[in-house]
Image (cartoon, helix red, strand yellow):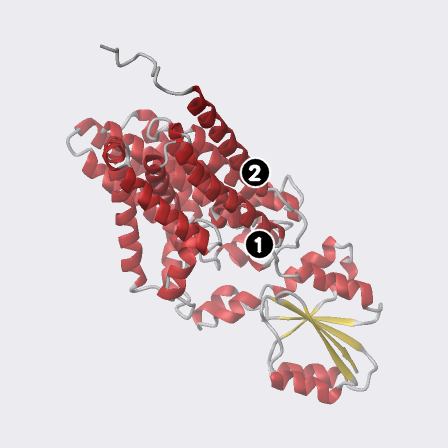
Amino acid sequence: MTSPDAPDLSREPAADRVERLAIVGFAALIGFGCLLRFWKLADDGLWYDEMWTVVAASDRPFMEMYRGWILGDPHPPGYFLFYFAWLAVFPADELWVRIPNAIAGVLTVAFLLFGTTRVLSRDARIYAAALAAFSYLYIFYSVNVKQYSATILLVTVATVLYLEIAKGRRLSRRTAVALAATSVCLAYLDHFGMAYSWTLLGLLAVTLRGDPNSLRLLGKVALTFVVTYLPIAYFLYFAFQYSDNSQASDLGAFLADLAPSLFFDDRTSVAAFLVALVAGLAMRMPPARSELRAGPIRPVLTLLVTVAGGLLLLSLKQPILVIRYFIVLFPVASIAVAVLTAAAFPISAGWRAVVPLLFFTRAAVVDFRAVDGMQRQEWDTSVDLVLASAQPDDVVYVLGADPARSTLDYLRVGDYDSVVYRQNLEFYEYYFRRRGADELAGRLRLVEPTVPAARQLADRHRGTGDTVWILAGHHIQLDEESLWTLEQAARGVETTWLYSTIVYRIGF
């Protein structure tokens, strides 16, 4: 009788070679996905959401940033605090402001590959890392200045800690410290990350109910979470008090965006893979069922259903059916898909691994094209156009809302458009100064997108021979009546349409 620990002599050497080649293939693909986080990182100018953080956190006193920017932002203050420290050391240009997010994206992939050995099999770790490497939303936030790349990393770590604790049904001091630190960091980054952390603690309380020592330690984690969260609890109240209920929140659009965001934007390939996944599980049903029972699929699905259910219930009261608000679900959903893929297509089977290998190869092609062709709002291009064409005496206006009124002033009256556009003047000043045009940045003028404001501008310059430029960024523009008012007083109006920005040149 053969010992269970004896080598499998019936296994063909060719199968070993196929397995090694498959692992090399996955390693190359995962490495390529990580490199995509740095592809053309400095090539495109910042878009509105990026400048909101960068301009706020650079070249200003902390209290000015707090009063003028942090208090008016719907997110917790952690991301601003990080960038306030980061930009005190590094320059506020495209490369250096985006690098932390790209690094967070790579760390997410690396953690799934190397930091999950206690809860995932080798194949599940490889598939989870590949899914993270090519999830379009993971890549998108890795190359942009938004807190979601860091949120994804921390949610991934918290999820794996939960799975480790649930598997052992015991909370050690090491995992308690890690869980507390991760939960606090999530709360300071994202309100939904905070809710996710509380969900983990609640599920762990149920899991550990038979172990008084672990429950006491979990109670200390919860207490630490509460005490450290109290200083920023106001921001959660603020988010509910002044939430923009006018924003789009459509279930159909949300569901249509879900698969391309979690995987990549090729619906045919994603659908074909999911069908193949179901078929692969059916074909390997007896061993696959045994592998799934031995793995973490039950706590993974419990967590996924619990958080998804809570978010859907909240969506009945708040307009949150937007992909970025559900991003806390992506790590646990990816782990679930990875575990199922490992059961359906074990890499040790050789030929079965071809299916996910082809799937991720297609993902690499699609995501490379997406990153290579990514367009951002052309605030910088607008500035370059003016600097290349304007004469020294030309007058440059910025279309926006009055920055003399605070964000809170606009929020209290429900004027969400002005909340967005009150920063336009500072955003254009930022790019003029980046181009060395400090003098021009200092004499930029503001004009509001209204007929009375257009009439005042026309009266001021009528018959003067002035050339006036109006810069409009982030979807703002002169309406037909305002533009007509200017045309009546001007010799000519030229409009240059860029990507989400507009440049008006008006000759009086």
Q: CA distance from mark 1 to mark 2?
A: 25 Å
Residue situated in front as seen by the camera: 386 or 180: 386
- Left or right placement of residue 44 versus residue 367 in this view: right
Give the amino acid at mark 1. Answer: Glu
Q: Position of residue 489 (x, y in %)?
A: 74, 88
- Residue 453: image quadrant is bottom right
Residue situated in front as seen by the camera: 161 or 10: 10
Give the amino acid at mark 2. Answer: Phe
Q: Quadrant of the C terminus?
A: bottom right
Query: What is the residue that sits farthest to the bottom in this orientation?
Result: 488
Does residue 51 appear in this view?
Answer: yes
Q: Quadrant of the N terminus?
A: top left
Q: Position of residue 482 (x, y in %)?
A: 63, 83
Which residue is drawn at the image coordinates 37% and 51% (left, top)? 192
Which residue is drawn at the image coordinates 45% and 51% (left, top)? 269
Q: Position of residue 264 (x, y in %)?
A: 48, 50
- Left or right placement of residue 296 versus residue 404 in this view: left
Does residue 81 appear in this view?
Answer: no
User: Who comes first in sequence, dot 1 or dot 2?
Assistant: 2
Which residue is drawn at the image coordinates 50% and 47% (left, top)? 79
Label for residue 50? Answer: 1
Circles 1, 2 touching at the beta carbon (< 8 Å): no
Q: Is residue 438 above or below residue 212?
A: below
- Left or right placement of residue 329 versus residue 108 in this view: left
Q: Is residue 189 above or below residue 423?
A: above
Mark 2 neighbour density, 10 Å: few (under 14) some (14–19) many (20 or more): some
From the image, tell me which residue sits under label 2: 32
- Callout 2: SS: helix
